[in-house]
Image (tube, helix red, strand yellow):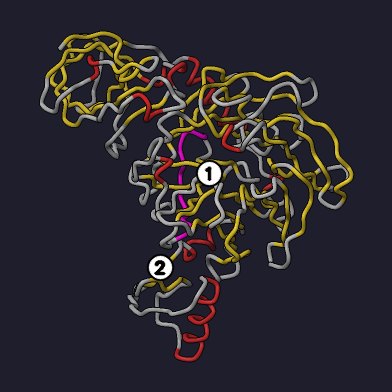
Amino acid sequence: MRRVSLKFTVFVRGQFWAVCVLTVFFAVFGWPSGVVAGLGVGGKLLLSDERFAPRWPHFRVAWVQDHSAGSRDVCAAGNSLQLMVFDSADGVGERVLLGKLGNYARPLITPDGRRVVYSSHADRSVWWVDFAGGSPQKLAGGFALDVWAEAKTGATWVYLADWVGKPESFRLRNVRRVRLDDPQSEEPVWSDTQISPDNFQLSLSGRLAAGEFPWPAGGVADLETGKWVRRGTGCWASIAPDDSGVSWVFDGPHRNLQMFAPGIERGWSVPVNTAPELAGHEVFHPRWSNHAQYLALTGPYRVNGPVNTISGGGPEVEIQIGRFGAELTKVAEWFRVTRNDRGDFFPDAWFEGGETAVLDAAALRTLSVSVAVRPVQQVRVQVRCAEASRIPVARSILPYRSALVVHRYDVLAVEAGELAEKQILIAHWGIRDGSVQPTARVRPGQTLTLTVESFEEHRELRGERQIMDGAWTGIPLFYVVSGRK
């Protein structure tokens, strides 16, 4: 198919109306070969990946778009947001659902795909609106965490909680649920610990929930017994929407999912910054969809912010949908939902028929065997630094108190052990307990002899903050055990 490049400016306020104008224009003058639905901004036709939609199941996405200067409202705490949606089947592309600038935090699509639930920080309340559009309706006070369908009754429950102090406290308590069609039907859910607001997600049966209890302790709670199991250190814990019990905790570098499953307590990592447009940079807001094979996230994050790169946000941050491979060790395919000049945050994806999808049990059994027999191997190598990451000042990584700094090295010689790679990444402690570690300072061209182990084997480090200035993909990561300059 021939790609046609069109350059013009659409002087229309709002993306939805821009699409309408384009639709009318081409309906009258004809659609050039190769043109798909898009949005004219700044003289360019911006395209989503809608041309690939036919080979994907029908899906919908809801998210918030930041219209503040710099698009840095990554936590959706401000009042310059619009509520956005996308439907892979309607050909419209990105659509404004609620266009009045305000606070629309943490949108969630209901299990039937027909409504969007969101929260307002302005008055600490929970609302819903039809996916097709209309007037928003207030449901209850609090902050919405998840939506779940009860199989026996078909009822849709909204799980919510109350802030501990101010929203920036990053703590919630008193998890409860109310029926979407009956706000008076409140039931208690979890009060054993406080939780964090980035994600709290239920399994298909509703018995298990992934979350932080609170951050940075990511894990899975049994809502019937009131007990929870810590899986790792990190954020954005999530659980598969089937009843496989597979879960993840997002790692400190904001690039990999730390995956866990019953019988695979050792865990394994899945890189999620592998979409072409992400180019190895940090990503955020990872959340399992209602379909076990698909997740949503945002990225790339390239702008240094007041806390870290994530806090920098930026207009380049877009919505991506990923499809896991059957073996659940990689994201096999990506679908870029948005292409615009605003920051897009907090996506939630819904797939038609997702409630019947389950992870491949045979693939999980095979994975269990391979993870269990994976050896822990030390390698002593002589390396030369090719690229060095900066060591930040300690206050810039708060609330973290420690951070690993990752440098890229060329392998000059292997003195002990086995290593086939000619380039590796090595993580050094750059900050420990609030103090900068001078030994982590390395200059490009400097030669070192180090004993290293695969970072994959150091489960205790996966949730630590990592400083990685380069967009380095496909290069194995190691952790320095000992060495000399």
Drawn side of residue 323 relative to residue 313, left or right:
right
Disc nearer the start of the sequence (2/1): 2
Location of residue 33 (image quadrant): bottom left
- Work out whether 374 lies above or below 50: above
- Work out whether 255 lies above or below 415: below
Location of residue 45 (image quadrant): bottom left
Which quadrant of the rendered structure holds the N terminus?
Answer: bottom left
- Residue situated in front as seen by the camera: 42 or 240: 42
Which residue is identified by label 1?
75
The residue segment tinted magenta is: 328-338
Badge 1 marks a residue whose secondary structure is: loop
Q: What numbered label is drawn on residue 141?
A: none
Which quadrant of the rendered structure holds the C terminus?
Answer: top left
Drawn side of residue 418 relative to residue 151, left or right:
left
Residue beneath the point at 49% across and 46% down: 74
- Residue 235, horizontal then vertical, whole percent: 53, 31
Which residue is identified by label 2?
46
Q: Amino acid at mark 1?
A: Cys
Magenta region includes residue 337: yes
Q: Amino acid at mark 2?
A: Leu
